[in-house]
Image (spheres, rainbow, N blue to C red):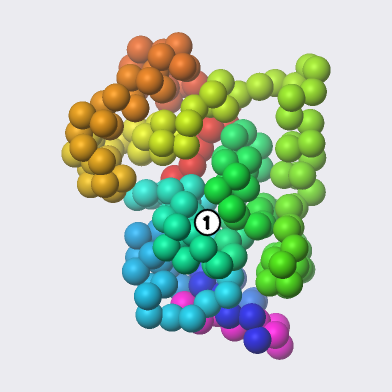
Amino acid sequence: MIKVLLVDDHELVRTGIEALLNSEDDINVVGVSHCGEAALEMLDGIETDIILMDINMPGIGGVEACRRMLQKTPDIKVIALSVHNDGPIPQQLLKLGALGFVSKGSPVDEMVCAIRAVFSGKRYLCSEVANNLAFQGLPGAKESPFEKLSQRESEVANLILQGKSIKEMSDMLILSDKTINTYRYRLYEKLEIKNDVELTRLAIKFNYIDG
């Protein structure tokens, strides 16, 4: 039996996916969570094989949650769920160690296939993500400036886009206010912008959305 921990901030989505997965003979949803922080705490109390996690969540977001989960439990297998299949997020997650990426627009059968494939030790990317990754860097491809950011800079950018204060970002990422401001300055410099408004405009232009 494949044991799955489901993480998504929308109750209707969680309920629907949980019911669909539990209808499969070889899959059992052993826990559900509404955010990355709560899912991290749950890892201490349940035994799970797969973490099926939405990337676009409030709080620390899916990328940072993935990093902490794999740091805490290196053998855990993470499959990302998202409505966004382009931009730098899929590549960041794969570099962190996620083994799968499935679009929320994919058929239910594809989600089930991804779970079975990753459980067996394989990687699984939905066709949209696979195509986007394959064409990155080719002549004529539209490169996102956000690809210049380091992982920490990306996490700070995500939290800024959520409207978090310096103190909130410090608490979430377990970093000092001074360090947060340093990352903020660096990402503005790399993106060639001056303030949060320009960051938001750039994020909309390049479809850069995490959680």
Instruction: Identify which residue is drawn at 60% across, 45% down.
Output: 95
Side (left or right) of 142 relative to 83: right
Where is the C terminus found, in terms of image quarters?
top left
Q: Which residue range is magenta in the image?
A: 23-31
Is residue 84 in view?
no
Q: Is residue 164 above or below residue 171?
A: above
In reply to whether residue 26 is colored magenta, the answer given is yes
Q: How many marks?
A: 1
Instruction: Identify which residue is drawn at 49% across, 81% down.
Output: 47
Side (left or right) of 34 relative to 66: left
Amino acid under label 1? Asp
Q: Is residue 62 above or below residue 152?
A: below
Is residue 91 in view?
yes
**Residue wearing tag 1:** 54
Instruction: Identify which residue is drawn at 62% across, 33% down.
Output: 87
Counting from the top left corner in percent of width and height, residue 127 is at 79, 48
In reply to whether residue 186 is colored magenta, the answer given is no
Along the viewing direction, whichever of 52 and 123 lies nearer the viewer: 123
Counting from the top left corner in percent of width and height, residue 49 is at 58, 75
Instruction: Identify which residue is drawn at 55% across, 48% down.
Output: 96
> Where, by quadrant of the figure, is residue 102 drawn?
bottom right
